[in-house]
Each structure stands twice: as C-alpha cells, then as structure tokens.
Image (cartoon, rainbow, N blue to C red):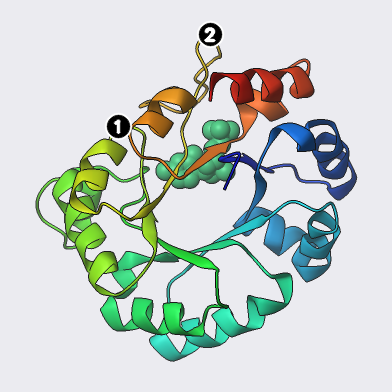
Amino acid sequence: MSNPVFLALDVPQIEPAKALLQKVKSHIGGVKLGLEFFCAHGGHGVHEIAHMGLPIFLDLKFHDIPNTVAAAMQAIHVYEPAIVTVHASGGRAMMEDAKAAAAEGCKVVAVTTLTSMDSSDLTATGVYGSAETQVMRLAELAHKAGLDGIVCSGKEVGKVHKEWKDGFFVVPGLRPTGSGTGDQKRVVTPRSARDNGASVLVIGRPISRADDPEAAARAIEATL
Ligand code: C5P
C-alpha cells in the first residue's frame, strides 16, 4: 500500500462521512469502517463509501464458531474489503477457517487483547498473567493459524515485528506531534509506528476533528 493511512470513519451520519472523505481522500490510503458504522448503515453504507474509490478496511472483529465466522467472511466478499478483523481468542480453527473463506488478496488480521482490558479485567475472564503476555501468545497463535497479521499499538509493533518478519500490522492510537491525545493513553506518532514496522496506520480524530481535515491529512502524509 503506497499511503498506509486508513481514516477511521467513526462518523454517525453517512453524508458528513462522505463530505469528510471527499476532502481528505487524496491524502489517505483507505478507510476503516467499524462495527458502529456497519450496524447503523449496513451494506448500503459500505457500498456508498466504497464507491468513493478507496480501499475498505471492515473492522467487524468476528468472534464465533468457525463455521459461522467462515460464512460471515464469505458474506462480506460483496464489499471487496482490503482488510478484515477477527478476534484471536476465537481460537486457531476459527482463524484458519476465516482465512480460508476470505477473498483472495484480502488481509485477515487478528485483534489480540482489547486495549480497554488490563490484567485485572483479563483475570476476571479467566486469563492469568499480564496483558502483554496474552498479546504475544495470541499473536503467535494468529501467525500459526495463517492469518496475515494482527492489530497492535505503536508501542508493541516493533517487538511483534521482530518475531513475525513478514506480518501485516495494523496500528491505531496514533497522534501526530502537537495534536491532542483524547482518550488514547499510549500514543506514538504515525512516523514512529511506520518506522517500527506498521503496515497500516489507523487515524481518526486527528484528521476528522481537525479544523481543516484536508490540511491535517496532508501534514500527516508529509511526515511519512
Ligand atoms: O480517533 P482515533 O485516531 O483515536 O481513532 C482510532 C480508531 O482505531 C478508532 O476507530 C478506534 O475504535 C480504533 N481502535 C483504537 N485502539 C485500539 C483498537 C482500535 O483506537 N486498540
């Protein structure tokens, strides 16, 4: 991918989302549509955004029995996503079947541990040990299952990249120098994540909430 920036289109209405995309589209490489967007606007919404010509990252975080996840994966072929996500905690068979059912060329990447969960949250779900140990364990499982890569933070991507040289790494939680961090706590700059091995940089509010989104996207592009 020439421009690694995927804009997180966490905008509740379709028309403002399209207007934003129109402004920034020449400075980004793709668009990330999440669960919120998909539940609100369905396949129609995805097609509306896809018609604007940028690659689509469908961040639906599938997690179910292998047969169901494989069927869901087949059902989204119509949107021709470039990237989709599944939960690594669904297990090896689920990930293998997800990858087998994905369209050719579509990157299937695993979410390891939600960043909203710390060690005590993990313990409450029966997972003992640190969040980092769990991330590394699930990254290895995703690799063995034949997935393309994982979603990880800019702080972890260097370490994961060392273990998984040809992995495809999707990194959110990025903040260009000088922009507000919002609710993101462990942030790095887009350039630093890229230098540490990120394949895709997911960026939302630093572009979408900027006074001038086009200038913000252009400035980020220039740092890469
Ligand atoms: O606005 P911001 O740049 O923080 O948006 C980041 C995007 O990446 C959001 O869509 C958010 O849900 C997603 N994300 C994240 N942190 C994770 C996983 C996903 O911020 N660990």
Mark 2 vs mark 1, CA separation in Å = 18 Å
Which quadrant of the view contains residue 149? bottom left
Q: Quadrant of residue 16?
A: top right
Q: Position of residue 68 (x, y in %)?
A: 49, 87
Q: Residue at x 69, y 43 (%)?
A: 9
Question: With 84 as the anchor, is 211 left or right in this view?
Answer: right
- Disc 1 marks a residue whose amino acid type is Lys
Q: 212 and 39: which one is in front?
A: 212
Report the number of numbered marks. 2
Q: Give residue 134's position: percent from left, percent from top.
A: 18, 54
Q: Which residue is mark 1?
A: 155
Disc number for residue 29: none
Question: Mark 2 falls on what kind of element?
Answer: loop
Question: Of label 2 and label 1, which has the lower sequence position?
Answer: 1
- Residue at the spot 27% in from the left edge and 77% down from the top edge: 92
Q: Is residue 27 visible?
A: yes
Q: In this picture, is 96 found above or below 123? A: below
Whether residue 183 is situated above or below residue 166 in the rendered picture: above
Packing grade of label 1 (10 A; few <14, some 14-19, many >=20) is: some
| Residue at screen point 90% across, 45% down | 15
Residue situated furthest bottom in the rendering: 67
Amino acid marked by disc 2: Gly
Which of 183/157 is in front?
157
Give the image location of residue 72, x and y in percent.
57, 81
Q: Residue tagged by mark 2?
A: 178
36 or 187: nearer the viewer:
187
Q: Is residue 187 visible?
A: no
